[in-house]
Amino acid sequence: MKPYFINQLLFLIPFMVCPIAVSAETEISILYTNNTNGALENCLCPGKAYGSLEKRVLYIREWFEDNPNSLLLDAGDFLSPTRNALKDSIAFRIYEMMAYDAIGLGDQEFFKGAQFFSDLMESSSLPFISTNLEKPNLADLKREIVIVRNGIKFGVLSVIDPGVFLFYPKRVKDEVAVSDFSSTLQSQIDQLKEKSDIVILLSHNGIDADRQIAQSYTGIDVIVGSHTQTVKEEPEVVGETIIVQGGKDGYYVGHLTLQIDSEKNIASHEGELIPMDISLTNEPAVVGMIVDYNRIGRERAGSRVERIVPVPAEFVVSSSEACASCHSSEYDHWKVSRHAASLKTLKSEHKEKSPECLACHTTGFGRDDGYLNYNITSGLKNVNCTECHYASAGHLAEPAAFVTETIEEANCLRCHDE
């Protein structure tokens, strides 16, 4: 054998007898949410530039298509502290569209009474968990949940601070009882640790209490917090415990990525909050539910407010920008008019969701294809051209053949009645 080939063979021998070194760590992502507060979507008003469930549903679905070994958790208060049963029922159904592994209960789930939430749970397969809820007795409520991903067992507990109900109406306090977990939590952690590798606590106590819990109890690897609606852009570590929390109203989906070693301990971690930005695509099914909800709201408002008279059905509603290509000088005139900033006046008075005001400060309000909110129908904010200049669909296709209707006094009197 020639020396060259002998040398090559000697070079390859170490690779033939020794396995190639590979990382022994397993990467697992935890997606978490908290304090959605029944927000179906966001109006994108100043200071509220993010969406909510209409963005989250599609975002999470696409994430899990690419990262199926992730976990999805919620730390509670996903319903609102209001009496709007219809809106919360819709929020509940939207939650059923997401693959949550565990949902901790917060105080707001019971704001409309224990029976309301119990009725929602009755036909649902959502994995609700509360370790210290004593009353009401909810069917299928878990005390703990064990989730397996990539051979790693994640044990989940969830606790509520009894003090969060302090200022609730008596009717709620009479129906809900939460035990003091301070003397029992450690034993529950220890028992769960025997059948899991990583222990996660869904804590509905607030950020300061979460820090105290991390100092007082051993064996908690991760705390997903809620109630105080704290925006923690990065995880906080207290002792051996990672603490995260993701703001409010569905503005964010939290990401916590864990590197887990061969002993099934957390070797390292990193995390961030992903804003549900306006650039993210809406989930069409959720938008449909929101449109139906808003339609019901308009119908209810219309029965009370006589002045809501939408643009007649035979005419289109459109943004002024759609008119600008042919009517540039008129568009420039409109841009500096009060009509072009009509919604801004409502925001300054915090009336941007008042139906009786939106009827005269937006375009097409009261129609199924008219203004709903900044998010879904941003082009119809303010009083656009078609709100006054009634135009048919034919006019948009052939302007010369289908002229706009002459503005009559009645057009103006729909809103300018004084």
Image (cartoon, rainbow, N blue to C red):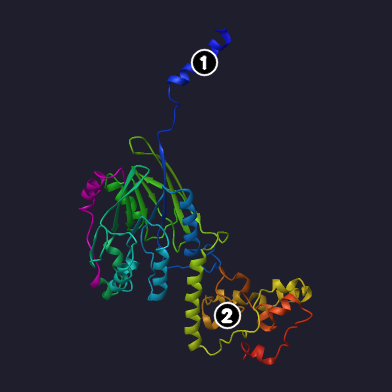
Left-right relation of 198 to 406: left
Image quarter of the N terminus: top right
Type of amino acid under label 2: Phe
Q: Residue at x 76, y 78 (%)?
A: 399
Residue named by callout 1: 11
Left-right relation of 411 to 156: right
Type of amino acid under label 1: Phe
Q: Is residue 297 above or below residue 97?
A: below
**Residue 84 placement: quadrant:** bottom left
Residue 407 colored in magenta in the image: no
Please state which of residues 162 and 125 is positioned toward the viewer in this rendering: 125
Q: Is residue 382 above or below residue 207?
A: below
Please state which of residues 196 and 188 is positioned toward the viewer in this rendering: 196
Name the element at disc 1: helix
Image quarter of the C terminus: bottom right
Residue 406 image point, x, y percent: 73, 88
Contact? badges 1 and 2 (CB < 8 Å): no
Return the disc, 1 or 2, that comes first in the chain's sequence.
1
Q: Which residues are magenta?
A: 174-198
**Residue 167 placement: quadrant:** bottom left
Residue farthest along the front direction in this orientation: 1
Q: Residues within 10 Å of mark 1 (few under 14, many from 20)?
A: few
**Residue 315 placement: quadrant:** bottom right
Left-right relation of 138 to 278: left
Q: Residues within 10 Å of mark 2 (few under 14, many from 20)?
A: many
Residue 149 image point, x, y percent: 37, 46
Residue 346 image point, x, y percent: 57, 77
Q: Is residue 105 above or below residue 396?
A: above
Q: Report the Cα–Cα distance between label 1 and label 2.
A: 77 Å
Residue named by callout 2: 365
